[in-house]
Amino acid sequence: MVSKDASADRLQIPGARHVDSSIPGAVNHHLVVKLRNALADGLAVPDWHEFISDKSTVLEHLEPGVDRVMRDAGLPFWVTREYAPAGADFDEQERRHGLDRTYRLILQGADPLPHGLVEQVLMQPAVEDAHGIDVAEAPLPAVATQASIAATSPAEMIHLAYAKALTRGRPDVRVAVLDTGVDAAHPELRGKVVQQFDFVDLKGLDTSGFIGDFAGADGDATDEVGHGTHVSGVIGARGERMDEGAAPACGLVAVRVLATMRRDGRLYGAGVVDNINGGIKYAVDVAKADVINMSLGIKHEAGALPHADVIRYALSRNVAVVAASGNDGSPERYYPGALPGVCAVGAVTGTGDVTSFTSYGAQITCVAPGMNIYSSFANHTYAVASGTSQASPFVAASVALMKSFARDEGVELANARIADILKRTSDKVDGQLRNERAGYGLINLADGFKSLVHSLN
């Protein structure tokens, strides 16, 4: 889908094309099944990431109904866990959100999932949800070089100086950027990335159009595209050749969930939707993130809402989730931005007007600068880009600053209080409390921090 504004960042999966998991030539297709009840305690079920390379623990039966459907289709499979537990076993919060009863079936042969098989699995009484593995893709953003567009600063628009006079963030307040990775050696970001992981693993799918690193989850989240580095610069840049990041003292966690593919001379960002879920859980459990920024999103095609279980889990751990609303200027809903509890962010121009490309189907919480944002880019370079992808990290960084200030005062700031502050203190675009396209308005960190300070006294 082409954005209504040619300058809009279209890396976000809003407007994405979904590639079905039954691509010819793919091997070891995956089927994700969420049961109504978890398998028996003590049953050894390996994590799917580990199972790909280590098949020392093998389980070939899930539950009678699903087993029968798969057997009738002539599809032997291995059972793995979709999510690894945060500790030695799943705790109450993980069980509450169904993460302990979500499994990934890895087909033992190269046969694709037959038409109608997912529907047959869904008909089984023991099954709550099921879907094949999809790759979502979208055109990568067109960006400008430093020479073609002058750098502009949005700091005054959101009164960032007021907040920074109180706090520049804390290293133990971490912002996880789920994106195309990060150029951790960039002059603006050296020493800022405290943890990283690459969840891009397209084994079992047709990867003929992909370039760069697309197989094998590992600890190297190097950005080959630039989008994740651009977003990270908005949050944490040193200010060497650009404006300092909005939360420069906070730790950055780079979680690579999108790879690069080339088709018809164009580059696309692409990733397995379910692997993004693993990235969210990693940010919560392993990286101990306080804020997650997701400048990406997908439409709801069928079945359960994308990312719903793991986003609810993140929120239950008091991890704030901030997401771009989308870039097609339509009332379409993109996820995770449209999920309850997620702070969905739209973009405004340099004059404070909502951009034509801001999607507004999600219940937008607020808007932030998103037009002609100058920031770090891949391969130690800089670029100007526009989109709700650029607006989202301004809000994520603002939330991190609030959490940092509260922690300095000995208080762990709850997501609900942050949401209330944003709703009450953002600058309204008209006389209404909430506007369909701008939410509660343009974030105002001067008023926001005045409210926060007052509430903590």
Image (spheres, helix red, strand yellow):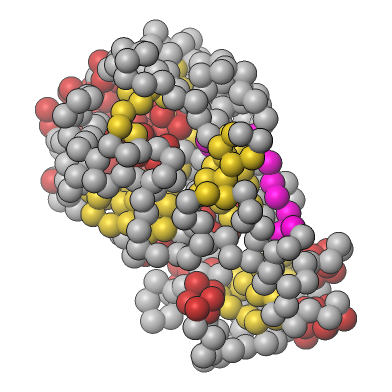
Residue 317 as seen in the image, left or right of residue 381:
right
What residue is rendered at 62% in x and 30% in y?
361
Nearest the eye: 267 or 219 = 267
Q: Is 360 situated above or below 101?
A: above
Q: Is residue 257 magenta?
A: no
Quadrant where the C terminus is found in the figure: top left
Residue 387 as seen in the image, left or right of residue 304:
left
Q: Is 367 situated above or below 315?
A: above
Measured from the top left, where is residue 179 in percent x and y? 44, 45
Regarding residue 288, the answer to whether it shows in the image is yes
Q: Number of callouts in the render? A: 0
Nearest the eye: 328 or 416 = 328
What residue is rendered at 32% in x and 39% in y?
379
Span shown in magenta: 11-23
What residue is rendered at 86% in x and 63% in y?
116
Measured from the top left, where is residue 296 in percent x and y? 51, 40
Nearest the eye: 272 or 124 = 272
The overriding secondary structure of the stretch rendered in magenta is: loop
What residue is rendered at 62% in x and 18% in y?
4
Q: Is residue 22 magenta?
A: yes
Measured from the top left, where is residue 15 in percent x and y? 65, 34
Residue 353 as seen in the image, left or right of residue 308:
left
Residue 100 as seen in the image, left or right of residue 177:
right
Name which quarter of the figure residue 61 lies in. Answer: bottom right
Name which quarter of the figure residue 70 lies in. Answer: bottom right
Nearest the eye: 232 or 185 = 185
